[in-house]
Image (cartoon, rainbow, N blue to C red):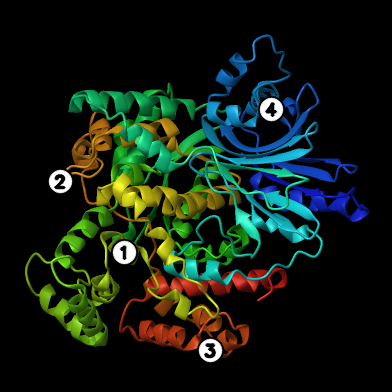
Amino acid sequence: MCGIVGFWTKKPFQNKDQSCIEAMTNRLHHRGPDAGDVWQDPSRGVALGHRRLSIIDLSVEGAQPMHSRDGRWSIVFNGEIYNHEVLRNALKGHVFRGHSDTESLIEHIAVFGVLDTLHAMNGMFAFAAWDHKEQKMWLARDRIGIKPLYYGQWADRWIFGSELKSFQDVPGFRPKLNRAAVTSMLRFNYIPAPETIYTGIHKLPPGHLICLARDTEAPMPEAWWTPREAALRAKSSMFEGTDGELVDQLESLLTDAVGIRMAADVPLGAFLSGGLDSSTVVALMQAQSSRPVQTFSIGFHEAGFNEATHAKEIAAHLKTQHTELYVTPEQARDVIPLIPKYWDEPFSDSSQIPTFLVCQLARQKVTVALSGDGGDELFGGYNRYTRAPKIWQLLSKAPQWTRKMAAASVMRTPRLAFRGLDAALRLAPGVPQLPLFEDKAYKAAPVLAASSADEVYLGLLSHWKHPDTIVKGGIDRYAQYVQKERNSEFPSFLERMMLLDAETYMVDDILTKVDRASMAVSLEARVPLLDHRVFEFAWSIPLEQRVRADRTKWPIYEVLSRHVPTPLFDRPKMGFGVPIGEWLRGPLKDWGEHLLDERRLREEGVFDAAPIRKMWETHCRGDANMRYGLWDILMFQSWLDEHKKTVEL
């Protein structure tokens, strides 16, 4: 696991460029504290930089930038190739210097080329490979998008790197704020690929590569693997076995996916939340380990946010070496000032806070940790997957014009009225002590007017329903996520939801969150449930076997039940969050007021201040819990405080 940077100018280096690549590389020290080096060819205008977190082959033979034995290729690589021995075996007679996966990669490229090598790889990765002979730079990213890669053209050069902060050392770098990206961030709480917060700088999409050549002015990324195409291929050859055969095959595949991710020359462990996915990963790790697996979880004293007790019970059953930390509100809040430093773009999934804390805890004992991310998107685990179809089934029975009137009526109803309904319901026995109406009525109101099932789903995902009215000059790209061609390819609404999440939310929220949090503390996080073989097998399972009426993620549930008694994990799904809403009314109120100061908002000119102030005041009075929308704005404002010098508003 590492950090990579580089640039390619269209003319020979100037003196300032030779120090530029070193500064860019050092910006990513946290991604690779063990070593760092640069390579440059001033006559060709090419420079590559690398920071190393040593995992496989700790010797100097694994150092980067690395050059192929034949001298044609130079590479910087971030990630892990779990089947790199397979790549080596394809190079019969080749003599290797060390046993690193980077050497396997570059020598395979030297013989078979970039594209064939990509298809042969099983891993998480992003790399930049310079072809000395053809004078071309190849940038590539793994199938799922586990490892990040940013690129763009600035002045006379192409620049690229694992994180946007590395571009701050490029001479004159001060791009314009991408207001369309800010608009998307308010809707989804992240910035979807290929856009970034900077105009003209892009995320390379997952499963894509791009070739930068001197004679190509505007090269475009090309897909070498996509979730949609992989899902369609899998569905063309559906699994036809019994339930028992399905569970057998999935367990075998997951066992291998977990096993190959346990290879490391450094201490290794796993995150254990106590949920279905992380428990399955840990169970399969322990089944293949001769010693107790090191597991890590964090807990909160607030009952609605604590899963640590469940994790502890599962750890005890599996006999792992378990470490838990109960976090105080003060410890959690101390993470907030670090967010704009490690998340180079505005990012407002508040679970970034506990994710950072569990990574920090794990790094005290291990250098590699396996996580359970990906199971929800592959096997239908999110609660919204069951709610959205039911909502649309009800809505579709009424004409859209009547639903629009109903939505308007809800929005005109005072929140105190809904709070009164909640209070009355709480007097009834057996009713959960939750705000059944107060929050949900206003969140659901815009969904009432949806014209399709897909619009219902996107409405449920959206924090701000009309973010282009909040961002001055903003453009809402909402419509591009409602693709009618998906309806014929994936007639099932549930499958369309899962596929959309695999293409967007999973990559740009979940995996981005885990990458930044883990790399901030120099920890490598591996995600076995997102092995591309698991992805493709999951999509080959008939939907009625993947998701049952009474059981989401049924195949995963059955695999885990072979290793852990069901009473230890059979419970409703729980999020991984913190009580942001309460904090904003209490200990974070002054911080929020500073960032949301009306005069400041008007002077910066990014947002329309009036609706933001109204939302803030409503929340602070306790009239409603507006935590999601406010956290979006606060995370942007916090980011802006950190990056004002590097962006033109």
* SS of the residue under disc 3: helix
- The amino acid at mark 1 is Glu
Distance (Cα) linking label 1 and label 4: 45 Å
Q: Earlier in the sequence, mark 1 or mark 4?
A: 4
Distance (Cα) linking label 2 and label 1: 23 Å
Residues tagged 2 and 1 counted as in contact (Cβ below 8 A): no
Distance (Cα) linking label 2 and label 3: 49 Å
> Residue 17 placed where, x, y %?
86, 52
Distance (Cα) linking label 4 and label 3: 54 Å
Is residue 52 left or right of 315 when viewed as pictured? right
Residue ID at (42%, 29%): 258
On residue 106, the disc is: 4
Res 267 seen here:
yes
- The residue lying toward the viewer, choosing from 356 and 642, is 642
Q: Quadrant of residue 628?
A: bottom left
> How dense is the environment of label 2, judged by Cα within 10 Å: few (below 14), some, or many (20 and up)?
few
Distance (Cα) linking label 2 and label 4: 48 Å
Task: Identify the residue under disc 3.
Answer: 598
Is residue 531 left or right of 388 when viewed as pictured? right
> Residue 15 placed where, x, y %?
93, 53
* SS of the residue under disc 2: loop
Residue ID at (66%, 21%): 99
Outermost residue to the right = 15
Task: Identify the residue under disc 2.
Answer: 549
Q: Earlier in the sequence, mark 2 or mark 4?
A: 4
Q: Earlier in the sequence, mark 2 or mark 3?
A: 2
Res 308 seen here:
no
- The amino acid at mark 4 is Ile
> How dense is the environment of label 4, judged by Cα within 10 Å: few (below 14), some, or many (20 and up)?
many
